[in-house]
Every structure is written in structure tokens, then in C-alpha cells.
Image (tube, rainbow, N blue to C red):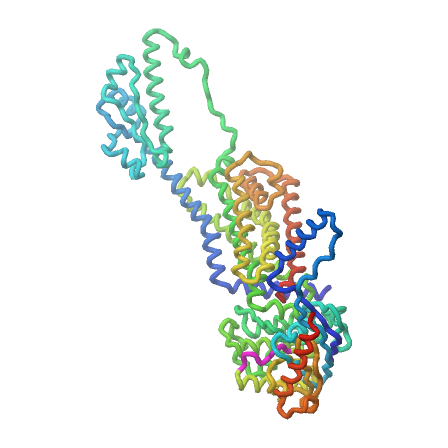
Amino acid sequence: MIEVRGLAKSFAAPGRGRGAGWRSLTGSLRAKSAGAAPAVPAAAPRVHAVRDVSFDAPNGRITGLLGPNGAGKTTTLRMLAALITPEAGTMRVDGIDVVARPRDVLARMGVLSDSRGLYPRLTARENIVYYGALHGMEREAADARAQDLARMFEMTALLDRRAAGFSQGERMKTALVRALVHDPANIVLDEPTNGLDVLATRALRDSLRWLRSPEGGAKCIVFSTHIMQEVERLCDSVVVVAHGRTVATGTVPELLAETDERDFEEAFVKLAFVAERAGAGAAP
Amino acid sequence: MKRAITAVWVVLRKELSDALRDRRTLATVLVSSVLMGPLVLLAISGLVASLESRAEQREVYVAGLANAPTLRNFLERHTYVVKEAPADFEARLRRSTFTDPVVVVPADFEAALVRGDVPVVEIVSDSANKQSQASTSRIERLLGGFSRERALLSLALRGVSAQLLEPMQIEDRDLASMQTRATRITGMLPYFVMMAVLYGALNAALDTTAGERERGSLEPLLMNPTERWALVAGKWGAVACVSVLIAVLSCFSFLPGQWMLRSDTLAAMFQYGPREAGLFILILLPLAAALAAVLMAVAIRSRSFKEAQASSTIVVLAISLLPLVNVFDLGGEAPWHLWAPALAQNTLMTRVLKGEALGLEQVLIPLAVCIALTAIGVGYVARELHRAAVK
């Protein structure tokens, strides 16, 4: 179970890194030597990637994080994986605070992140077992689990090939199995269908449905996407994110009812577009 | 804690097998650092051997031999073979196709000698032609002997003691032991071994940091519940292991290398056995550890392997240039040498080659410097790891 409340994060605007810092430093020194009061440094331009994101993802459900490009989905998931620290808000995974106990949270979570690089000189099996071992699994156990998952994702033939020559879909599957090797209760996937063909996407959907079911372990699954069909076909509930804010939450029928639309794409555009105007209005 | 140590081991094992599978890079490093040393040693021994054989040949080339029967008589009495120099010897000396200096005797040599007119005899060599340059001093000594003999004879005829001509006697006494003299030639050996350590660490260090960023595998790696320092320690351990492995190969490659030495004198002077190789490795262990950490710290800031290669140039340059202070013998051994990494190791290895004992201070200072560098490097990488992953 994952609970996220009021998450916010901003970054220094790119392109004005060190030079800007140097200029502001020399500027403030000059101001000091001129006898002026040490001015509050002029607020550096910041990109507010996430302003206010909240959602609940219960066990045995698939929660979709739907939003246009640049809405803050990847930043949110990176904060959830304790890779970056939020400026505001709380995140709890199975009741454990992410910021306070990041390693305990990561042990209960399988994350397929935005970058999903493999080690090209290792075989798929070695890539997967390495992560199992980092999760504290015995090598044999990790290997057995890799075998099971490979069967589920139909990649048994890949297991003993080196990752160097893998296609995008093969890399994706290996990364997914690698993220699931320690049988986590919570699964977080950042745009998992990117680069997958129709068959692979279908297989992934089936696997996620199975993982959601009681016999699959009733996992809590969160996945981010910008593809409407994924959400319609798979998600039990949808969190619409735009301009770093949660703008709507509910099941697909609920969102359709809320926007008075019959087509989910139209509903989404309405929600995100309204948010965009609101976001533009709120921006300084 | 126990789990973190297991994680260090897991990371180290993975990184090692990953690095050892990078066959092409390993082969390049092996050829450039492990084979190069013995090859250069062989080349030098060939050169020394050819100089020695030239000295043994006892040949003198003279232009205008017919003008100087007295000189010829003197040279032949000293068991030298006197040969007429080729007509175009100057051009050939310049082109380095002729490798002996030539004695040029003027046409009126004998007559001038009898008259006491001090004839001028030239020894012609080309300072750009190293081999001709090498035997010049030998010919000079030989001709000096001829002058002295003539002088002694004239004095004896006038009943003057020969000692008047030489009111004092000069004798050389070289304090250098056989081994010390040998280090003038074998002094480059520590340098080659050190380059092996450097290039052994370089690729592995860049691959586990900047390479990991470039592949996009650093972000998922940090989503494992492993302590940061354990990840970095494992990576650092693997890089240091690869570096030490190359160093061991390089140190031992000189053992068979010296069996093939073509110069007997050089072979006799070259004191490098398994004991020296072992000491070399002990001296290099801390350097390998420190280099691994420093290179990783430099590379973690780079987004790609290529960028990391560019920024690590400074480290590579420093490690390559510092030992040259010793090689060029700039001002002898100074206390600060022990505080500079690479230079300190070079100094210590040179002492081992000279057969001198290593003092406690000489061992402890470089060790402390390397431990400090390792700690700083590993700490920095651990601190930067998260920032590097998301950028």
C-alpha cells in the first residue's frame, strides 16, 4: 500500500548552473564591499517539477498515474523510490515513511524506473540475480525466482544470453524481471510499455493483472503512463497529474461522469487542459 | 552491518566479473602496460650489447692513414685494427649510416710532428648520431695516450723525469655499487610498473561510475536497499583488484624479460628477482587503492565515458609526470618526494632495485597518503552517487 500526500519538488533551472552561482556570488561580494546590506540572493529561477501530488494506491489494485509529458510523473516516482528528497509532503509505503527509512521501503518495493540500463557484459540471468543478491536473497533463491519470472514474461530463452545484443523489448522485460526478483509487495513502474510491441504490451498487461489477483499476491501496483488505452484497459483507479498537481482521482467511469464525456481521451484533455489553465494562472 | 558487508562482496564480485569480461580493453591494457616494459628492456639491452661489441672490436677509422705511420704503429701496438675511413664519411655520419667516429690526419702530420709544430688531429662525429658519439671518448683517450707517449720519449731523450709532466696522479673511485650503477638503466622499470597500475585502474574506474551513468544502470542500482557506502566500497574494491592484477602481471613480466637480456653486463647488473617483484607489489598495493578511488571520484561527475576520459587526463598526467622527477634526477631525493603519490612509490621501488633497505618512515608516509586519498575518493563518490543518478 502506498500513500502520497502533498508532494512537492523544484529544481534549479538548467543551463544556468555553476556560472549563475559564480555570478551571484561575485555579485553579492561586490554588493558587500560597496557597503550595501547583504541582499537576500535574488531567487534563482526554479522549475517546479512537482507542486502538489497526492494519491493512495491500495493493495490488490492497479493505480495509474496519467499525465502529459513533463507533468511530474517521473519525479514523483523517483521521490517514492527515495532517489530524491521531496521539499514538502509525505510518502508512506506499507505505513513506513520513505524519507525516514528509505532502505526498509526499497526492500518492499520493486521499481522499474525511467532509466532501465542493464549490464551489457552480463547475461540476463546474471543481471537479475545481481539485484536479487543486493536485496539479500541467496543466489539459488534468486536464480529460481528469475526462472519463474522468465517463464511468466516468456523470456526463458533470453536468460543465458548477454544483454549486449538485446532488443528494446528484451531489455525492458529483463529490467522488469530484475525489479520483481525479490517478490515485492509494492510495484512501481514508470512508463513500462515504452518501446514494447503489441504482443509484449498484452503480455505485460496479463502479468500485471495476475500480480494484482489474490493468487498473484494481491500486489499494490502503481504505474505511470501517458497512454489512455493502458489506463482504460488496466487501471482500477486513475490519478490524473498535470503541471505537477493531482487534478483528478477516480475510476475511469467516475472520471467520465465528472467531465460529462463518453470518450476517456476527451475527459483527460478536459481535466489536464483545465489544470493547465489553472496552473498557468497560479504560476508567478 | 553484516548485510552491508555481504552487499560489498556481491557488488565486488559482479564488478570484477564484468571488468574481466571486457576482453578488448583488458587486452589493450595488457599489451600496452604489461608487454611494453620487457620489450623496452630488451631494446635497451640490444643497444648496450651493440655498444659493448663495438668496444670489444677495437677498431679505429682513420682518414689519411698514409700520412701517419707513427700513429698507425702506436694503434697497432695497442692491438687496434686500423681501417681507412670511407671517402664520404661525413655525409654518412650525418645520415647515421656510419656509426664510428673518424680520426682525420692532416697531410703533413709526420713532418709537423718531427718539427714539433703540434699538428691538429680531428675526431669527427655527429652528436645527433648517438652511436658515433658513444665511442668518441674512447678514441680521445687513445689519441691522448699517443701524445703522452711522444712527450715521454722526448723528455727521456733530454734526461728529464716523466713525473715532471704529471706532478699529480688522478684516479677514479666510483662509490656506486654494482646495483646502483645498474639502476641508471633499470630505473625505468618502476615507471613501467606504475603505468600498468594506472591503466589497469583507469578503464575499470570509469566504467563503474561514468559508464554506469551512461548506460542508465545507476538509477535502478540505487533503487536497491543497499547502503551507498557498500555499493561504492564494492565498486572501489573491484577497480583496485583489477589494477593490482595488472600490476602483478607487469611486475612478473620482467622476470622472464630479463632472461632474454642480450648484454651480459646488463644481465649481471640487473638485480630483479621474485623478491624484488614481491616488494614492488607490496609498494604498489596502496597506490592501486588510492588511484582507484581518485579516478572514480573524478569520473562520477561525468555523464559519459568520453567525458570521464577527458576529465581523468589530469590524474593520468600527474601520475605519469611525477615519477620523472626521479628519472631525471632533479636535485636527488628530497623529503617531499615521499608525500607525493606515484613519486613516492617510484622512490621506494628505486631503493629496492638499488638493494637499499626501506625505513619505517619511508613506508608509512606513502601508505598514509594513499589511505587518505582512498578515504576522500570513496567518500566523495558515495556522496555524489545519488546526484549523479538522477542527472
- Residue A80 lies in quadrant: bottom right
User: Residue B144 at x, y = what percent?
Assistant: 36, 21
Query: Viewer-proximal residue, B60 or B116?
Result: B116
Residue A284 lies in the magenta stretch: no
- Which segment is the magenta one? A189-196
User: Residue B44 at x, y = what percent?
Assistant: 42, 42
Q: Is residue A45 above or below residue A193?
A: above
- Residue B95 lies in quadrant: top left
Query: Viewer-proximal residue, A144 or A117?
Result: A117
- Residue B149 lies in quadrant: top left
Q: Residue furthest bottom?
A: A262
User: Residue B307 at x, y = what percent?
Assistant: 54, 59
Residue A191 lies in the magenta stretch: yes
Q: Is residue B346 above or below residue B250?
A: above
Q: Is residue B100 left or right of residue B278?
A: left
Q: Residue at x 66, y 44 (%)?
A: B364
User: Residue B21 at x, y = what percent?
Assistant: 51, 65
Q: Residue furthest top?
A: B159
Residue A215 in view of the camera: no
Q: Is residue A119 left or right of residue A10?
A: left
Residue A145 in view of the camera: yes
Query: Viewer-proximal residue, B182 or B298?
Result: B298
